[in-house]
Amino acid sequence: MSLDAIPIHVINTLPVGPGLTGNAPPLLHEISELLRHLLATGETAAIDLSALPLTPADLDWLHDKLGEGEIGVTLQASGESTLNETACPGVWWVTHHNEQGAVTSQFIEVAFVPELVKAHPQDVASGQEYLELMIADL
């Protein structure tokens, strides 16, 4: 029997569409592993989407697959930053813009709470001092 007689069927499991490279689906597997690690150890992680060979169509596909969550945070500091929970709690889509509004970087952050949102201990100490001064003036 010749090899030509063996039927071969190619099954494409990657998303097909204009502008899609197939580079986004493996990220879902990586995010799943990072969530598993977060739950086991409490350690956070981030994926720099801007550093990966992803097209705008790939980013749209990934954003669509991860969906929208319940929490969104907007920060104003040298441009706007948005931190949006995806439909998968613990997975955050973080986008930083410059002062002109252009996207400068995008990350997937796997964390219970994104690091950027957490108050720095010195800021909390300043807040405590402010509150104590306010209480003293009552």
Image (cartoon, rainbow, N blue to C red):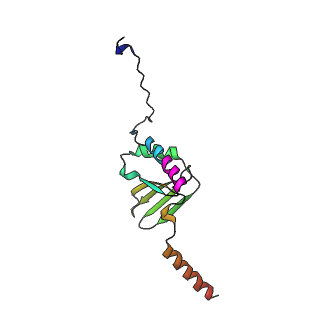
Q: Where does the image place residue 90, in percent across and percent down from the top left?
A: 54, 54
Against 97, residue 121 (above or below) is below
Quarter of the image where the C terminus is located: bottom right
x 50%, y 44%: residue: 64
Against 3, residue 132 (above or below) is below
Q: Which residues are magenta?
A: 32-41
Quarter of the image where the N terminus is located: top left
Dominant SS in magenta: helix
x 51%, y 43%: residue: 65
Q: Quadrant of residue 129?
A: bottom right
**Residue 71 is at least partly visible in this image:** yes
Q: Where does the image place residue 83, in percent across and percent down from the top left?
A: 50, 58
x 45%, y 41%: residue: 25
**Magenta segment: does it hold 12?**
no
**Magenta segment: does it hold 38?**
yes
Q: Where does the image place residue 44, in percent across and percent down from the top left?
A: 48, 57
**Extreme residue in the right direction:** 138
Q: Where does the image place residue 70, in percent across and percent down from the top left?
A: 59, 54
Q: Nearer the viewer, residue 52 or 79?
A: 52
